[in-house]
Amino acid sequence: MSAAQAENVLATSPDAPVVSLKTKQASVAAGGQVIVEVFVQNIQDLSSYEMRLNVVGGDRGALTLEKIAVDQQRADYVFKNSGVQILDVVDMSQQRVGMVRFGGGSNIAADQQGYLATFTFRVSGDAAGKFAISLSNPESAFLNNSVAQQIPHRLAARGGRVLHPGER
């Protein structure tokens, strides 16, 4: 994807769909686990998506991706009760997840959040400092409508998460 195409993927309008990351904890013990859930809101005709997360920072150690999952049984799952076939692809070698809904798209209101995926990271035993978790970049995070056009979106104001391993 070129820089010009990437600019078309990330929207600046306050009415654009919003992608956000959520964790249950702001800090985690070295050796522990971090679960990051990805959500979207204010979107019309969502038919497919693909994404991966990026981890940077830390004074030492690492956060290693252990698992990517899409819980299709969740009440807030974006394609819940769609009545059509859904294909999910988890690619651990590229650390990404993709989903396709065959037949139409889903709508998520501005005041609701639609669940997309869960990324589980293991914190190394020697980890210390602040690690930032975010969507990797526009090339690896896209939302498409039912005619395979990319839907411009923006990241939540707190679209990434910072974790502090070893701090209590």
Image (tube, grey):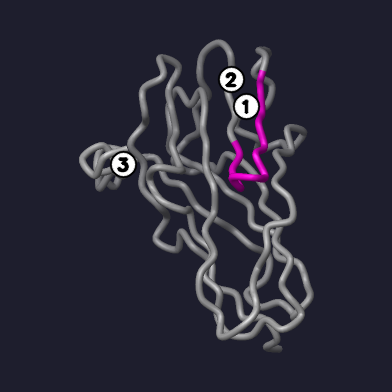
Measuring 58% from the left and 33% from the top, which residue is drawn there?
98
> Is 82 in front, or is 98?
98
Q: How many marks?
A: 3
Measuring 76% from the left and 80% from the top, which residue is drawn there?
125
Q: CA distance from mark 3 to mark 1?
A: 22 Å
* Magenta stretch secondary structure, dominant: strand
Q: Nearer the viewer, mark 2 or mark 3?
A: 2
Kind of residue at disc 1: Phe
Q: Nearer the viewer, mark 3 or mark 1?
A: 1
Q: CA distance from mark 2 to mark 3?
A: 24 Å
Where does the image place residue 82, in percent across and percent down from the top left? Answer: 64, 18
Q: Secondary structure at mark 3?
A: loop
Q: Please determine whether, in this image, residue 133 is positioned above or below residue 146.
A: below
Q: Please determine whether, in this image, residue 32 is positioned above or below residue 83.
A: below
Q: Which mark is residue 15?
A: 3
Instruction: Name the residue tied to disc 2.
Output: 101
Classify mark 3: residues with Cα within 10 Å, few (<14), some (14-19) or many (20+).
few
Magenta part of the chain: 86-97
Q: Please determine whether, in this image, residue 3 is positioned above or below residue 106.
A: below
Is 154 left or right of 12, judged from the image as shown?
right
